[in-house]
Every structure is written in C-alpha cells, then in structure tokens.
Image (cartoon, rainbow, N blue to C red):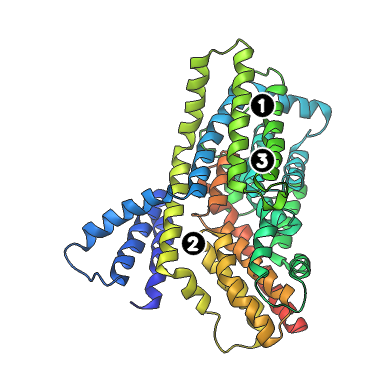
Amino acid sequence: MANWLTLLPAIVAIAVVLWRKEVILALLLSLCTAELLIFIQNGQGIGASLLLDGSIQTLERIVGVTADAGNARILMFSLLVGGLLAYLRYSGGVTATVNMLVEKGVARNARQAGLLTFGISFFTFIESNLSSLTKGISTRGLFDKFNMSRARLAYIIDSTSSPICIIILLNGWGAYVLGLLSTYELPLPAVSVLLGSIPLNFYALFTLAVVLYTIISGKVYGPLRRAEQQRNTLSHHTEIETPATHPSYMLVPLLTLVFSMVAFMLITGNGNLVQGSGSKSVLYATVLACLVAYSMMLFSRRFNHQQLVDIGFKGIAELLPVVTIVLLSMALGTSLKVLGTGAVIASMVDQNIPHFLIPALLFLAGSLMSVTTGTSWGTFAILIPIGIPMVTLLGLPPQLILAAILSGGIFGDHCSPISDSTAVSSVAAGCDLLEHVKTQLPYALFCGALALIAFVVSGWIMI
C-alpha cells in the first residue's frame, strides 16, 4: 500500500468537517477509512467482505478504546465534569461568586475577568486538563456577566493550558519529555536540554503573548469576532441566571478539585509530584469535588437526593456529544498509530536538506502529525527519537531541536478538532467544539507562522 494513503483518514476528517460542519460524522468516516486501510494493509485484499469486515473492525476499535485504563478515566472524567458543572450552576454558587468578585474589585470588567482566567493558569500548571477545567468553572459566569462569548473563553483556556504546562515543566509534561530524552547520549544533561528549550519554545511563547494582547486590548478578529457578536454557547444558557446563594457552593468544590488533584498526584507518584498519574488524579479529584458539591446541596435542605441525581444526569447529558467526540478521537488516534501515519509524516523531514532548516521542518512535521492524530504527547514520542539523534550525528543544538518538536506538537494540537485537550477546553468553557476550533484556528495559524519564521532564523544563527 502506498505511503500517501496513510494520510487519507486525516484528509477525510478535515474534508467532512469543512463540508458538513459535523465533527462526529467526520470522525466516524475517518475512522472507517483508517480501518479499511488497515484491513488492506494486513493483506486481506479488496473483496465483497471488505465493507462488512471494515465496519465490524471500526466498532471493535471503538470498544477497544475503553480497554485502556487511561482512556476510560478520561471518558469518565469528561462525563463527571458535566455533573459537577450542573451542581455548581443549580446551587446558585456561581452567581454568588460572580457577584462577590465584582463587588470585591477582582473582576469588575471584561479585562479583569480575562486576566483572572490567564492568571489561574500559573496556579494549575500541574495538569493541563485540571487547568482547563478550573479556569472554565471559575470564569464562565464572569464571561456571561460581561457579555463575552464562550468561544473567547475557550480560546483563552486552550491557548494558556498546554503552553504554560510545557514552559513551567514542573509537572507530568516535564517528566514525560525528560523520560524520552534520558535514553540518548547528549552533550548536555537531559535536564539542562529541557530547561534550555523554554526560551526557544516559540509557539508557546507567541501564543501566550497573543492571548495577553487579546485580553488587555479587548480586540478579537475573524470568526471569533463573529462569535462574539452571536455569543454562541453549548446549551444556550448562562451560568448566572440561577438566583445567588453563597460563594461557598462554588468555591469549596472548586478548591477541593484543585487541592485534591495535587494530593492525588503526590499519592500516585509515591511522593513525587511530577511522577504522578494525571489521568488518575484528575478523575479522583473530580469525583471528590462532585461528592462535596452534592453533600453541600443536600445539607442545605433546598434539594433532596432525587433532585440532585436528576441535576447530575442533566449535566452529564449536556456533555454526551463532546464525550462521544473524545471517544471517537481516541479510537482514530489508535487506528492512525497502527496504520503508521505518524511515521510517514516523520519521514518527510528525513531528506537531504540544509541543516539550518531542520528545526523548522521538525516544527512542520510535528504540527502536521499532531493535527492529524490529535495528540501532542504522541507526536513527542515519535519525533524525539527522530530529531534527537541528529544532535549527535550532525552537531545540532539540542535545545533548539527539542523546542521545535515541542512547539510543533502543541501547535498541531491547538488546530486539531480531534484533540482531547481541544474537547476538554470546549467542555470547560461551555462552547461548541467546532465553534471553538473555528475561532481559535486563525490565532493558532498566526502564532504558528511566527514560530516557523523564528525557527528558520534561529537555525540560521545557531547552526
């Protein structure tokens, strides 16, 4: 089978999204395409049973996603988030917290609300999903209060979570990349290379700068500007329409979520924070926060058990479409890995090219790989074994090569409609997933173009 055919599932997904504006249909057709190609790749041939066997294998691939414990935890977490958000909304705690923040002067206007969202990222850098969820819960009501769209909130959430996690690095991201680097003989210690990549991680730095500009200036452009005028939301309600009660109904579950996340990271990492399991910790913390919110509402005597169960399931139901997208994107990512799509894209940079262009080409390869597979970590796992050996063989600066790979992975992740971080950000903000992708894409492309130029210039100077 020709190598270029491995790119066909990604092409199908993008084409259907642009044509029909339906992410679930695009993912299903892309997954079916990938499974049919795998069927042919395994030497089964093209025959009458191709469609039947391919369809059955597609279903089995979706079922197989839940066999992985990490995937199952993410799916459970995504559902439970809906219940938690519903509890906070129906309790009146969100409305009360918004009123308190406005009265205390913490967020008296749209700019301060945006800066609060941005600032929370620096306190929740431990895990990207925790960061997205905390920012969404904390500021959804404020964005409603000041007539800002959920699409703007989703953009700020998504464009600060991963970039800050990959810059601060005292978290699972840093431990993961350090683990990938530790198997190679480098001219500098792996920790030094990792730290040295921070000022060269151009996409992350440019993205944070543009987000800060957007917040301070209040100016939005392109599809985000149109969304701002329409103020599209996932369920067409605001967080502040429920009568205010007391801020504790929001703040206590929220603080429970954040602090228990840190505690569970320490527990699962045997006392080492950066070695903790993000998927386990965020699930356990979300369950605990749900129990706290449920208990507070029950003891308030304003709700009985059955009412709280109904509220919880209403919240879960609101997120079922997004969780379906997460499930299908996980299945597609597995299929593309079996098909070898990432390896084909990576081979595109393995040509006879000028050395100073290698960082820029690694950035492009990482971007394409991440946008088609929906995973930045998977991109790191594939490209680091390709890029880092070049450091020794060709005498390239390891910090620049690593930064190009990390930047490409995050850039593609921001552009991908099948990325789990994109889905979590839209869930946290209460924004339609496709709306979020469409409104964030021009900003990501602008920062990506700046990063590409920066990697070309840096390669020219440093190599």
Viewed as shown, does residue 259 lie left or right of 27? Answer: right
Q: Residue furthest left?
A: 48
Amino acid, disc 2: Thr
- Which one is earlier in the sequence, the residue at label 1 or at label 3? 1
Q: Position of residue 88 (x, y in %)?
A: 62, 26
Residue 98 vs residue 28, the one in the foreground: 28
Numbered tag placed on residue 66 in the rendering: none
At x 77%, y 75%, the residue is: 188
Q: Position of residue 192 (x, y in %)?
A: 78, 69
- Which one is earlier in the sequence, the residue at label 2 or at label 3? 3
Amino acid, disc 3: Phe
Q: Quadrant of the N terminus?
A: bottom left
Examine the rendered structure and indicate whether residue 356 appears above or below residue 129. Answer: below
At x 76%, y 47%, the residue is: 122
Numbered tag placed on residue 94 in the rendering: 1
Q: Which residue was labeled with disc 2? A: 373
Q: Which residue was labeled with disc 3? A: 264
